[in-house]
Amino acid sequence: VGAIAELHHVINELADAGLAVVVISSYLPEILNLADRILVSRQGRVVEEFSADEATEEKIMYAAVH
């Protein structure tokens, strides 16, 4: 758990410095906490894009399966 918190801290520092950080995860609370932009892929293709403000777990899951 401490390692995850440290990793999130580093990701946020990099993003605050203006660097792009790509995070790939199926753990939606983590993604919603870290991301400015969320891309949903299905079968190797991007099927939806959300801003952090509009994204919810329900919207992401719907895009992933429909």
Image (cartoon, helix red, strand yellow):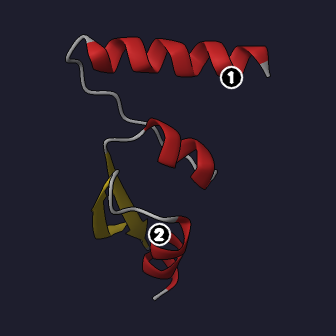
Q: Residue furthest left?
A: 18
Q: Is residue 58 above or below residue 25?
A: below
The answer to whether 59 appears left or right of 51 in the picture is: right
Give the left or right position of residue 14, taking residue 8 as reference: left
Which label number is shown at residue 40? none
Measured along the vertical axis of the image, is residue 34 above or below residue 7? below
**Where is mark 2, residue-wise?**
60
From the top left corner, tell me how far across and down residue 44 is, in percent.
38, 66
Q: Could you tell me how far apart the alpha carbons at marks 2 and 1 are, in whole angstroms?
A: 22 Å
Considering depth in this image, is 20 or 59 the residue closer to the camera? 59
Q: Earlier in the sequence, mark 2 or mark 1?
A: 1
Q: Residue at x 39, y 41 (%)?
A: 35
Q: Categorize mark 2 by other alpha carbons within 10 Å: few (<14), some (14-19), many (20+).
A: some
Q: Amino acid at mark 2?
A: Ile
Instruction: Give the quarter of the figure containing the C terminus.
Output: bottom left
What residue is at 37 percent from the left and 35 percent from the top? Answer: 22
Give residue 4's mark: 1
Q: Amino acid at mark 1?
A: Ile
- Residue drawn at (51%, 40%) of the image: 33
